[in-house]
Each structure stands twice: as C-alpha cells, then as structure tokens.
C-alpha cells in the first residue's frame, strides 16, 4: 500500500510559526511521526511539502496510478485552491484531509474549505498526531475496499 502525504505552504515552519496555534513540535518531528507510522502500519509512504500551489497540483497529478491514497494538509490553499481540488478529483484517489489546528473554530476566512466535501475524512485540531490518525484511517479504508 502506497500513501502520499502532502503538506502545503508554511508547514515546513512548524515549531517556529505561531506556536500557540500550531504547537512547538517542529517539522522534523512531523517527518519522524510520518516515518514511524509508516513503519508501524507497514505502509510505503512518500512525503512532499511545497509552498507553491502549482507544485502541489503537479505532485497530485504524478500520484495517478502510483499511489493508493493521499493524505493532504493543503494549509492556506485549503481556503483558496480550486486547482488543488480539481487535481484531487482528476486522479480520484481516496483522500484524507488534515489540519493541525481546529480550523472550524478559527477565523471566518478559514471556514471556506474547498477540500472538505471531497475528502473521505477530515482530521483537525489534533496537532501533528492528526497525521497518524489520517494515515491509519486511509489504511483501514483501503483495506476495506480490497
Ligand atoms: C492549517 C490551517 C490553515 O488555515 C492554515 O492556513 C495553515 C495550517 C492547519 O494545519 O491547521 O497553514 O492547514
């Protein structure tokens, strides 16, 4: 089973950016969690982070026929990007959305979410452990589809 984890803009600044919102765990710690979860769950996992919308669209397109599912935190693009939504729809892979913070309790502009209705599941407000939940969720989902 091959899962692609995608992180959008500023996720590489974890531990530095707004620690009151995103926590003090840094990006390296997030990568550790991804690696550990993949090992524990016996999943082949690739991680990609970009601050650029088009690069994320390209990566989603490349996932076609190469990955079984996508875990994505589109970060700020969650609230703006029809292009990322369209790319996800184009490759049509099971997709789980993750947000480190509880976006549904935050500013009005974050209540616009282009990804939520498409994703099979969303995790928010669990800090970086939300990625572990998302990976396990998509694994179980894909197992059920076998
Ligand atoms: C975020 C929430 C977004 O609103 C924000 O733009 C981010 C991170 C989260 O993980 O909580 O960059 O996706």
Image (cartoon, grey):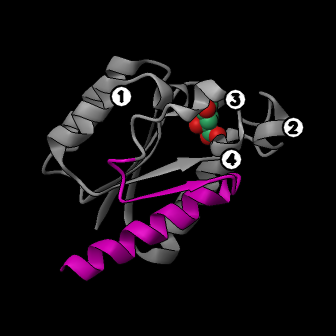
Q: Is mark 4 within 8 Å of ligand 1?
A: yes
Report which residue position mark 3 lands on: 107
The mark lying in front, picked from 4 and 3, is 3
The mark lying in front, picked from 1 and 4, is 4
Report which residue position mark 1 lands on: 56
Distance between mark 1 and mark 4 Cα atoms: 23 Å
Under tag 4, what secondary structure? loop
Report which residue position mark 4 lands on: 102
Please say if 93 is above or below 41.
Answer: above
* Mark linked to residue 71: none
- Dividing the image into 4 quarters, which one contains the C terminus? bottom left
The tally of labels here is 4
Q: Is mark 3 within 8 Å of ligand 1?
A: no
Please say if 128 is above or below 142.
Answer: above
Q: Position of 99 compared to 139: left or right? A: right
- Which of the two labelled residues, at mark 4 and mark 2, occupies the earlier sequence position? 2
Region of the chain picked out in magenta, as a range: 117-146
* Residue depicted at x 81% and y 29%: 18
Residue 45 drawn at (x, y percent):
39, 57
- Which of the two labelled residues, at mark 3 and mark 1, occupies the earlier sequence position? 1
Within 10 Å of disc 2 (Cα), the crowding (few <14, some 14-19, many 20+) is few
* Residue depicted at x 87% and y 37%: 20
Report which residue position mark 2 lands on: 20
């Amino acid at each position: 089973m091959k899962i692609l984890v995608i992180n959008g803009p500023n996720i590489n600044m974890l531990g530095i950016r707004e620690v009151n919102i995103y926590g003090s765990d840094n990006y390296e710690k997030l990568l550790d969690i991804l690696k550990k979860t993949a090992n524990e769950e016996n999943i082949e996992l690739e991680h990609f982070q970009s601050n650029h919308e088009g690069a994320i669209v390209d990566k989603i397109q490349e996932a076609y026929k190469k990955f079984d599912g996508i875990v994505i935190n589109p970060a700020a693009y969650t609230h703006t990007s029809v292009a990322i939504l369209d790319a996800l729809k184009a490759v049509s892979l099971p997709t789980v959305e993750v947000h480190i913070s509880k976006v549904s309790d935050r500013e009005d502009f974050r209540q616009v979410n282009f990804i939520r209705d498409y994703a099979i599941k969303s995790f928010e407000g669990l800090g970086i452990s939300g990625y572990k939940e998302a990976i396990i969720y998509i694994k179980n989902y894909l197992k059920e589809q076998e």
